[in-house]
Image: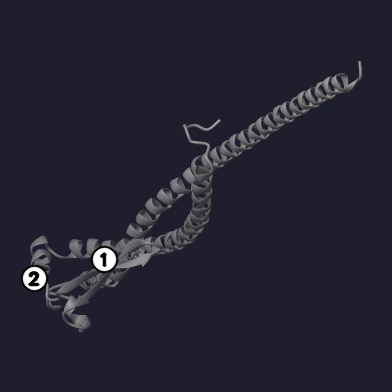
């Protein structure tokens, strides 16, 4: 039996068959989208793992160098050396469409292309370890932005995969079975009504046939009585 009340008519049956065909086509498209999203997600996860390892190694190297520089230099000299940066960076954010998911893309531009501009101090009163720390941080910057992209992309793709998976399951286990059950119910009702109409027509035909036979018998009996009466009247006395 269907879960909701429906009219067992041919119009409703045609409408449900059209909806079922649309749902099956949408189910296939959503499954293909889910599979492609999973492929994109796995690629982003692998890239994320590699970038995270590179960033952690670069930050560890910069932290080691900065720790040594802080041990060799006084806090006042270290703060004064890093107080006024010389290089300026502009960050641009655009979006890339990946399977209907807008994934952010970060890109930064430095004001000067001179590699020496990353050092905001003179080299006379600073240690070489501070140079190593600043250089390591400048080199890891691009990987950090790419890691932020991968992290956000994996989060957005995971959310879209979950939404798509729920839609696929809703169609596969709820909507499509309900429509198939309703179509089966309407088809059975229409067949039952057709059989009932056929039986009704057969009964009406039998009744008409019986009435016709009875009418012919009455006509025959009347004709026979009339013939007998006519014969009796014509017989000589």
Q: Pointer 1: residues within 10 angstroms few (<14), some, or many (20+)?
A: many
Spot occupied by residue 202 in the image (x, y as percentages of width and height):
71, 32
Report the mark closest to the observer, 1 or 2. 2
Q: Quadrant of the N terminus?
A: top right
Q: Is residue 178 above or below residue 228?
A: below
Give whichever of 141, 61 is nearer the camera: 141
Tell me what residue is drawn at x 54 percent, y 48 percent. 17
Give the secondary structure at mark 1. helix
Q: Position of residue 129 (x, y in %)?
A: 24, 70
110 lies above or below 197? below
Residue at the extreme right? 236
Screen quadrant of the C terminus: top right
Cα separation between marks 1 and 2: 20 Å
Q: How many marks?
A: 2
The first of marks 1 and 2 along the sequence is 1
Is 151 or 37 nearer to us in this picture? 37
SS of the residue under disc 2: loop
Q: Residue furthest bottom?
A: 114
Q: Which residue is mark 1?
A: 65
Image quadrant of residue 225?
A: top right
Residue at 28 percent across and 62 percent down: it is 64
Residue 189 is situated, as x and y percent measured from the top left of the image, at 59, 34
Residue matched to label 2: 84
Q: How is the image coloured?
A: one colour
Residue extending furthest toward the front: 237
Local crowd size for mark 2, using a 10 Å CA cut-off: few (<14), some (14–19), many (≥20) = few
């Amino acid at each position: 039996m269907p879960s909701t009340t429906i009219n067992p008519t041919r119009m409703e049956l045609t409408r449900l068959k059209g909806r079922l065909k649309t749902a099956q086509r949408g189910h296939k498209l959503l499954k293909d989208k889910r599979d492609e999203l999973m492929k994109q997600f796995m690629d982003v996860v692998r890239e994320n793992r590699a970038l995270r390892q590179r960033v952690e190694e670069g930050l560890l190297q910069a932290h080691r160098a900065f720790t040594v520089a802080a041990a060799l230099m006084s806090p006042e000299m270290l703060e004064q050396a890093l107080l006024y940066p010389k290089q300026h960076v502009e960050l641009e954010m655009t979006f890339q469409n990946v399977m209907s998911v807008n994934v952010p893309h970060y890109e930064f531009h430095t004001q000067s292309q001179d590699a020496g501009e990353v050092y905001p101090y003179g080299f006379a009163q600073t240690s070489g370890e501070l140079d190593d720390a600043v250089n390591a941080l400048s080199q890891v910057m691009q990987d950090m932005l790419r890691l932020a992209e991968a992290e956000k992309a994996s989060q957005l793709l995971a959310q879209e995969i979950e939404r798509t998976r729920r839609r696929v399951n809703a169609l596969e286990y709820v909507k499509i079975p309900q429509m198939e059950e309703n179509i089966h119910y309407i088809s059975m009702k229409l067949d039952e009504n057709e059989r009932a109409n056929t039986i009704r027509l057969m009964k009406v035909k039998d009744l008409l046939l019986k009435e016709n036979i009875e009418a012919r018998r009455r006509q025959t009996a009347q004709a026979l009585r009339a013939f007998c009466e006519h014969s009796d009247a014509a017989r000589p006395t």
